[in-house]
């Protein structure tokens, strides 16, 4: 081991912050190295004093000391190598073996790189090619779908034009019964024949077929997108609308006009069928509405219209003000009646009691007739809804209508009539009670 004095001589150079350039500059300038810190007191360490004295010496003396120091360090290194040469040789041998291991690792890494390149050529490149082919197939499928729908659209549009021409040329009017409802006896005779099948005329069948064509054209123009849970191999794809194609756009005005015409025919057939209790016309109207995909809404509108009619007739039958006007108009003119005419009265008097009774009974008779007529209409409509079925699913039209209705049309009719009768009867009885109390 080197002596302690030698270690003290080399303490400046063994410092981790030693800078040869600053040391040379300090020797040339005759300054101590390292410079003493300002915060320390006068009592410095022995190492700092020795370093300062060494730095203040002449340059030749400093160079001589450096030379001697280098020689001393070299001699110490030789002695250390001589003493530990066996350990150094073993370390060198292990380094040589490590180089062989590293060489094998490098070779393995190069082989791995070659394998990765082969895998890239076998997997990545085919995957990229397959992805490009999938996109191409998807576009081809979209183009084929557009062509298929366009071809079908043009074919159905021509068929619709032919059907509308046939409808315009048709001169056969829907069967009428001179504006009178069928008698109960005639209805009972025809019910057995109509129970299994409802006969429709040629004109009605043409209207239903035209409605089916319009619905198909609408679905072709506005197709539904593929659902996410579908079994399509390419996943959900939004179809291309056909309204941007010239061969389709030129048919749109004619289709809209045909829809308006068919809707008018449907409403007329429904009105005539309910008015004349003609099941054939009702069946044709309901079939047309089913083909147009508006059957539930149409049945809802019909039931609401009949319910509103019944409510208005009930309110009219129990309207005391209008009954009073009729009674006083037909009452004989007497001195007592002239006294009562000085103010508006909505209660019967001794003079106007017969006229009140007559007017009330006339209104009640009319109310009963109206209730019977509308009840027959509702039950006829419900009967036809039960008989008519979807040609594909065999589902009755009544089940389809119940998707919108809260209950059957007959139940809705009777609930509305009962509620309105109860409300108006209570109101009338309340007015009569107040008059009696007075």
Image (spheres, helix red, strand yellow):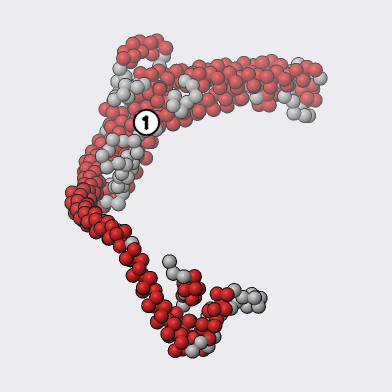
Location of residue 396 in the rendering, given as x and y in whole percent from the top left corner:
36, 21
Residue 24 visible, this orientation:
yes
> Percent x, y for residue 67?
40, 82
Q: Is residue 142 left or right of residue 406?
A: left
Q: Quadrant of residue 314?
A: top right
Expressed as whole percent of the image width and height from the top left, the position of residue 139 reads 24, 49
Could you tell me which residue is drawn at 23 percent across and 41 percent down? 152
The image quadrant where one finds the C terminus is top right
Classify 77 as above or below 203. Answer: below
Q: Residue at x 35, y 18 (%)?
A: 387
Q: Provide the residue designation for mark 1.
A: 289
Q: Is residue 359 visible?
A: no
Q: Is 120 located above or below residue 392 in the figure? A: below
Residue 262 location, quadrant? top left
* Depth check, front residue: 172 or 84: 84
Q: Residues within 10 Å of mark 1 (few under 14, many from 20)?
A: many
Q: Is residue 219 above or below residue 109?
A: above
Name the residue at 49% across, 73% down. 5
């Amino acid at each position: 081991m080197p002596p302690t004095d030698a270690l003290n001589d080399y303490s400046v150079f063994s410092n981790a912050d030693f800078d040869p350039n600053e040391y040379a500059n300090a020797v040339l300038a005759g300054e101590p190295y390292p410079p003493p810190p300002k915060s320390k007191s006068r009592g410095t360490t022995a190492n700092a004093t020795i370093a300062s004295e060494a730095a203040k010496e002449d340059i030749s003396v400093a160079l001589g000391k450096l030379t001697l120091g280098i020689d001393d360090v070299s001699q110490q290194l030789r002695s250390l190598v001589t003493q530990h040469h066996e350990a150094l040789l073993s370390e060198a041998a292990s380094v040589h073996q490590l180089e062989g291991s590293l060489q094998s690792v490098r070779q393995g890494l190069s082989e791995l790189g070659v394998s990765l390149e082969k895998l890239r050529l076998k997997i990545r490149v085919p995957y990229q090619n397959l992805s490009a082919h999938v996109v191409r197939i998807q576009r081809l499928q979209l183009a084929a779908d557009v062509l298929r729908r366009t071809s079908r659209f043009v074919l159905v549009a021509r068929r619709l034009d032919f059907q509308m021409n046939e409808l315009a040329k048709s001169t056969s009017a829907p069967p009428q019964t001179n504006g009178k409802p069928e008698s109960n006896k005639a209805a009972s005779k025809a019910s057995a024949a109509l129970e299994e099948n409802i006969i429709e005329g040629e004109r009605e069948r043409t209207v239903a077929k035209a409605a089916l064509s319009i619905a198909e054209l609408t679905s072709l123009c506005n197709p539904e997108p593929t659902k996410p849970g579908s079994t399509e191999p390419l996943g959900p794809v939004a179809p291309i609308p056909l309204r941007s194609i010239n061969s389709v756009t030129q048919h749109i005005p004619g289709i809209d006009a045909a829809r308006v015409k068919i809707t008018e025919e449907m409403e007329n057939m429904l009105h005539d069928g309910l008015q004349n209790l003609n099941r054939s016309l009702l069946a044709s109207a309901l079939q047309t509405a089913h083909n147009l995909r508006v059957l539930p809404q149409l049945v809802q509108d019909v039931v609401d219209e009949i319910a509103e009619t019944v409510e208005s007739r009930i309110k009219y039958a129990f309207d005391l003000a209008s009954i009073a006007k009729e009674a006083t108009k037909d009452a004989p003119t007497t001195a007592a009646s002239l006294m009562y005419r000085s103010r508006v009265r909505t209660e019967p008097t001794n003079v106007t009691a017969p006229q009140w009774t007559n007017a009330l009974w006339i209104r009640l008779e009319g109310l009963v007739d109206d209730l019977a007529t509308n009840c027959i209409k509702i039950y006829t409509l419900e009967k036809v809804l039960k008989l008519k079925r979807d040609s594909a699913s065999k589902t009755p039209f009544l089940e389809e209508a119940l998707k919108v209705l809260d209950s059957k049309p007959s139940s809705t009719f009777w609930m509305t009539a009962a509620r309105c009768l109860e409300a108006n009867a209570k109101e009338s009885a309340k007015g009569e009670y107040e008059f009696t109390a007075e």
